[in-house]
Image (cartoon, rainbow, N blue to C red):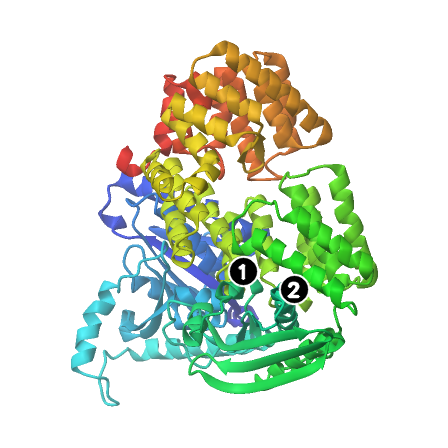
Amino acid sequence: MASEEKTKLRLEIAHVLFIDIVGYSKLLIDEQTEALHDLNHIVRQTEAAQEAEAASQLIRLPTGDGMALVFTHSTEQPVECALQISQALRAQPSLPVRMGIHSGPVHHLADVNERANIAGAGINIAQRVMDCGDAGHILISKRVADDLAQYRHWQPYLHELGECEVKHGVVISVVNLYADVTGNPAVPEKLQRVAPAAAKAPAESGTRRARMPWHEIVIALLLVAAAIAAAFFYFRKSGPPPSAFSTAPAAPALVEKSIAVLPFGNLSEDKANAFFTDGVQDEILSHLARIADLKVISRTSVMHYKSDAPRNLREIGQHLRVAHVLEGSVQRAGNKVRVIAQLIDSRNDAHLWAQTYDRDLADVFAIQSEIAKAIAEQLEAKLSPNEQGAIERPPTADVLAFDLYSRAKNLILMASGVATTDEKDIPQAIDLLSQAVARDPGFFLAHCLLAYAHDRVYFLNVDRTPTRLAQAQAALEAAARLRPEAGETHLARAYHLYWGSLDYAGALAELEAARRSLPNEARIYELLGYILRRQGKHEESLRYLERALEHDPRNLTTLSQIGGSYQNMRRYPDAAAMYDRTLSIYPDNLDVQSARAVLDIYWKADLRAERRLLDELRQKDPVEFKERALELFELSIFERDVSAAEAALQALGDKPVRNNALIYNKHANAGRVAQLARNEEKARAAFTAAREEQEKTVQAQPNSGPALALLALYEAELGHKEEALRKGRRAMALLPLEKDALDGARLIGVFATTAARVGEKDLALEHLAQAVQLPAGPSYGDLKLDLDWDPLRGDPRFEQIVASLAPKDLK
């Protein structure tokens, strides 16, 4: 009986990440200990390992010169962990590590000390895969690559290398996992040696390889049989792998059932009908986007191609990664409307379908539904009953209400995806939407957009008052009464919960519900990214933001926010690459040009790029230069140029200086200039006025941590020590890190400056040391250049913190 029990192996499929330190045996004993300590620390700090361990989905096995991490939930777990390790290792180039990943059968056993252990082909093959690589490589087996290749967001990482011969003549197929800033793109040395020989002597059926001993062949066959049996049960649950895997292209693979609905031409004599035309195009796009069997590009990206000039459809298809485009035009005259639409294969310019609709104006909504259904039929997209019902439902019966809604949506679009403008257009959009729902109280989409607009004004501190939040809530309740289970209702509620109260759990639940009926809605993934970022899950946040770009690849806000995320994380080369990518799409956008130039300030304390940009703008466009008074003001403060700062202050007028959630009023700006000029009397008068105005802001926003933090800072500038520290601590309590990892970190930094201003250096340095360890905390450039840190300059502890943040080429 005992012998029978020994032969019963409980086979499971596990997902194994094997790691070792290259050249470990050549290190001194002390160096080996230090290297393993550093590697263990990096692995333990990864989000993937922490989350898996918290869920009891990770087993760690030491291997002498590295470790095996056995994940039990999904193929993605070891891959995400490896990428996070690779990114962390960029800061420690002296620690050469290689990694291998495989999913396969494992079984539990007891080691010589009677402790639980794991063995099996899953671990063995992961080690063999790793053995094919050099330092920096993340290699994965073809099995894992096949699983990942089913998802678009993984495809750019996959680069097939071919076969590699490992121990006992066993040949395995390996794939290199890398992107711009992770992994090692070089071909491993082992495969470089094999490639020339393979080129000279192609494999033939009779080619001999090293013969394996018979007992090893038997063992290998048993392992293969076990793998097949385990895989059979695994794939019954998870679905079959793709039949073949090929080297992934630089961009996501083209989806056959993919489409971009380009802006329609306005052929009406009255050019004011352009908004109506945009509304027709947008409704067709929205109808198609509800179909889960299609990939549809969001409106913010297709609006980039709004032009009367002929369009290169092949180029557009390549830019947006779609196989098809829909073009059209709208002509409105009196109570009649003509809509022309044509479907084109963007790969070869072939016209697949075209139709002209001449109807009464009141039938325009039926035309939109008919076009959407015709396109779905042409692309052979499956329509569920719910999808068909949603497509056939008109947005409103009131054409004028629809016109008002379309105008408002255009204004909101300009403020949230196509251009990085301020929020001056949102109040106008709110007015238009209020008119639309007054004309048609049953206009569901207008209520949803109205709730979004009110919440946006509240979240961005344009009007962060209880009244504004109540207006958003009223619009949301109106939408929920009309269609409580609609995806748009869930999405609007997710924004409200996040922007209104930072209710992450509630917002995430609403987004999950919204995804079921809005499969192509990029805003869902974008908002997921923002929420996860506020929760401090920065790597996971980036993945969702990148996924939003799959459906909205030219969304300026998303592109810029990804750059900002990298900047917050102090991954400055990645931020620079993202800003450069954005500029390749929007080369003339001054906001992005400035963001790229300012990056050098925070990264290297280098002011030259921003100075050069503003000087060139002064010569080319003096009017726009005046609009850049904010950038000029901050630059002149960093340059310690009193006359330039005074000129910029005058140009700013009543405009506040915004640093994310922190909004410094005009009096505080004047106080900073007076401090720069060493005019203590003028500075005190300015900060007295700043405090009085900020007190009104705090009264209107009693639960705003950022507002109270700035009031504490102004108290400190006036020497009110106890009051400043009390309010500063209260501000941090209102917005702790667990509630907001970004602005919470910023408030810790503000408290450090507050404490420094009242002479509490130990307290200031304690909070500064904490803040610089956090994404969104003070940067090297901040500490080197900003006036706020002057009270700490010369203190060895402060200078050590500054030095720790310095780029390597400046150390």
Q: Secondary structure at mark 1?
A: helix
Asked if 503 appears above or below 186 in the picture, the reply is above
Q: Which residue is mark 1?
A: 548
Q: Dot 2, how many residues are within 10 Å of its Cα: few (below 14), some (14-19), or many (20+)? A: many
Q: Residue at x 65, y 29 (%)?
A: 733
Q: Secondary structure at mark 2?
A: helix
Where on the picture, by quarter, is residue 282?
A: bottom right
Q: Residue at x 26, y 63 (%)?
A: 188
Asked if 104 appears above or below 809 in the picture, the reply is below
Q: Amino acid at mark 1?
A: Ala
Q: Is 752 or 695 nearer to us in this picture?
A: 695
Q: Residue at x 59, y 13 (%)?
A: 721
Residue 727 point in image, percent of width and height: 64, 21
The span from disc 2 to disc 1 (Cα, nearest Å) is 13 Å
Q: Kindly identify which numbered label has been placed on residue 76.
A: none
Where on the picture, by quarter, is residue 381?
A: bottom right
**In the displayed structure image, the side of residue 499 where residue 201 appears, left or right:** left
Q: Is 213 or 383 nearer to us in this picture?
A: 383
Q: Dot 1, how many residues are within 10 Å of its Cα: few (below 14), some (14-19), or many (20+)? A: many
Residue 771 point in image, percent of width and height: 49, 31
Where on the picture, by quarter, is residue 488?
A: bottom right
**In the displayed structure image, the side of residue 762 where residue 521 appears, left or right:** right
Q: Is 472 or 75 nearer to us in this picture?
A: 472
Q: Amino acid at mark 2?
A: Arg
Going from the N terminus, do you reach mark 2 or mark 1 first? 2
Q: Residue at x 24, y 69 (%)?
A: 191
**In the displayed structure image, the side of residue 439 where residue 523 appears, left or right:** left
Quadrant location of the N terminus in the rendered image? bottom right
Asked if 560 appears above or below 649 in the picture, the reply is below
Residue 118 point in image, percent of width and height: 47, 60
Q: Kindly identify which numbered label has been placed on residue 515.
A: 2
Residue 558 point in image, percent of width and height: 51, 54
